Amino acid sequence: MTSREPLLSVEDLTLKVRVGGAEWAALEHLSFDVGYGEARGLVGESGSGKSLTLRAILGLLPPNAVITSGRMQFDGDEFDLARQGKQERRRLERLRGAGISMIFQEPSVALNPVIPVGEQIVDAVMRRDGMRRAAARDYAIHLMELVGIHDAEQKVDAYPFELSGGLKQRVMIAAAVAGKPKLILCDEPTTALDVTVQQQILSLFTHLRDELDAGLLYVTHDLAVVAQLCDSVTVLYSGNVMEGSTDLRAVFERPQHPYTEARLRSTPDIDRIGRRLYSIPGSAPSLADRPVGCPFAPRCEHRQDDCEITRVPDTSSIDGREVHCLHPVGSATGQIELAEEARGPSSRCFSAPTWW
Ligand SMILES: Nc1ncnc2c1ncn2[C@@H]1O[C@H](COP(=O)(O)OP(=O)(O)O)[C@@H](O)[C@H]1O
Ligand code: SF4
Ligand SMILES: [Mg+2]
């Protein structure tokens, strides 16, 4: 394997959910990478498909969900997400035990209420390293200190109900890193916390990234969190990637997708105190109401006639930034040109916008 290959690569992930006899696409043709030691923000509003994406990676889907296409590469191993026989499911299960761990929004989902917190970290350490219990307990205390629990020697025997929300979240993070994962998936882990604790947990993630050199796929609805923590970003809307890049700064400074641009305009900024915050009109469509063309069309200020009827193909700019839009922001002509590529119909690509 060359060092240029990403740690995680998800390609063309489409997932459908069955409800009342009908089937709806909740995720459509999603692709993104996470490099070794890279933190990628997967950002989108509620219902955009962030949690389902993480669940697809972990092989933990709701019973009414089915993946109809999708390939995954993790640390050199290939997985066909759409064809999960017994063997494939077992391979994914092994990943959950070792290479990938998950941090949830609600610690109560992950922590067993009747087992002391230290014990729960010890279990994760022993599963990974086959360490003896006494040594694993010492290591668990070390991990609790690493995540900023000061009196870890005492707290190690506490039950979850004896700890505050912030401390429980730290315990869950300690348990998640105990198995020395190469990739940590985080599903809005600070949303339920107050702002001060949220800041502490974000600083902790920055510290852990340096300490563990693990990849991070960080799901959030909050662009400010992505700005603080991540190197790269994938912007989701209604189950579709709108914009994605390894150059976070470029996306924030020069968004090319109208949705990214609108979201940035509606994000509070210290420099704009006193000014009225932009609010994107309307709301995201439900799975059943998604438009035929661009999913963002009903709310988009850049919308043109073709947007409502033309399915937006995969597009890419010359810097490798993905932009799924027929009329990207800043385009001089308001129209990008289709390059007739020779790579076949499934890998359509556009030439660089003329303004680039
Ligand atoms: N098991 C399910 N059955 C039907 N619809 C679902 C199911 N799980 C999620 N959805 C729908 O799929 C969309 C994406 O859900 P989710 O991934 O949870 O969004 P997010 O995490 O971004 O808020 C939402 O419209 C949600 O209602
Ligand atoms: S394709 Fe059209 S409607 Fe969709 S984001 Fe681009 S300009 Fe807006
Ligand atoms: Mg979610």
Image (cartoon, rainbow, N blue to C red):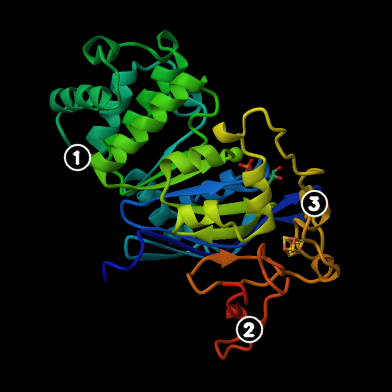
Residue 296 rendering spot, x and y as whole percentages: 75, 55
Closer to the eye: label 3 or 2: 3
**Residue contact between numbered discs 3 and 2, judged by CB atoms under 8 Å:** no
**Count of numbered circles in the view:** 3
Residue sitting nearer the eye, 215 or 82:
215
- The residue wearing badge 2 is 345
SS for dot 2: helix
User: Disc number at residue 299?
Assistant: 3
The C terminus lies in quadrant: bottom right
Question: Closer to us: mark 3 or mark 1?
Answer: 3
Distance between mark 3 and mark 2 Cα atoms: 29 Å
Position of residue 103 measured from the top left corner of the image (x, y, whole percent): 44, 35
Residue at 80 percent across and 62 percent down: it is 303
Q: Nearer the viewer, residue 20 or 346?
A: 346
The answer to whether residue 120 of the structure is visible from this angle is yes
Question: Where ligand 2 lies, by quadrant?
Answer: bottom right
Foreground tag (2 vs 1): 2
Q: Residue at x 76, y 46 (%)?
A: 284
Where does the image place residue 131, in percent across and percent down from the top left? Answer: 16, 34
Residue 284 falls left or right of residue 181: right
Of the residues shown, which amino acid type is indicated by label 1?
Asp
Query: For numbered disc 1, what is the local secondary structure?
Result: helix
Q: Find residue 10 and report its horizontal and vertical position in percent.
A: 48, 62
The amino acid at mark 2 is Pro
Is residue 21 in view? no
Q: Examine the rendered structure and indicate whether residue 177 appears above or below residue 16.
A: above
Q: Residues within 10 Å of mark 3 (few under 14, many from 20)?
A: some
Residue of label 1: 129
